[in-house]
Amino acid sequence: MILQFEEKGEKTGWTYIEVPADVARQLRPETRKGFRVKGLFDQFPFRGIALVPMGEGNFILPLNKTIRKGIAKNKGAVLAVQLESDDDFEITMPVYLSECLEDDAEAREFFQQLPKSHQNYYLNWINGAKTEATQSKRAAQMLNALARGLRFDEMMRAMKKERNERL
């Protein structure tokens, strides 16, 4: 069943499905950390989505807007799910972003110290932009945040706070 968080910190409003610990162990035994999966939601194929650990061995699988559109279902709907570990999934860094990081040693060093999953938050955010202008704007925001030593979630909170202060 598709669920949605009401009040859950940074996950407030997320739409997701629960993945019990025993199912996660079948996909990747002895893991308690998040990992990427691929499969089908009903007949809608997906790959590279992170299973997010929620404690006691259970996980959630977030359903973003693109997926919800693809399956034409929202909160409360029942969904047929097929999962397998997606060990080959790799998120690519745009060439221009790699070049920018080469020019900014401080930002590059901080980025390289982040866990792979946190690096991927940044890259997914930039790669998910629909226009080149938005990609460029997000890349600049990312480089600024990295130079300030901010993880992705910290950058997003800081940007939200700045927007609210302007209003």
Image (cartoon, rainbow, N blue to C red):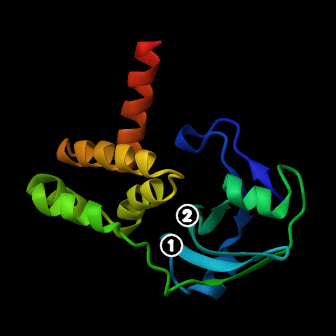
Percent of width and height locating residue 45:
73, 77
Near mark 2 (Cα within 10 A), the count class, few <14, some 14-19 or many ≥20, is some
Near mark 1 (Cα within 10 A), the count class, few <14, some 14-19 or many ≥20, is some
Left or right for 42, reference 53? right
| Residue marked by disc 1 | 32
Residue 53's mark? 2
Callouts 2 and 1 close, C-beta under 8 Å: yes
Q: Which corner quadrant holds the N terminus?
A: bottom right
- The reply to whether residue 103 is in sight is yes
Left or right for 80, reference 167? right
User: In the image as oriented, which residue stretches furthest toward the top?
Assistant: 167
Residue 122 in which image quadrant: bottom left
Residue type at tag 1: Arg
Identify the residue at horizontal 65%, vertical 62% (top origin).
Answer: 60
Determine the CA span between mark 2 and mark 1. 7 Å
Between residue 58 and residue 3, name the one nearer to us.
Answer: 3
Percent of width and height locating residue 47:
62, 76
Residue 161 in which image quadrant: top left
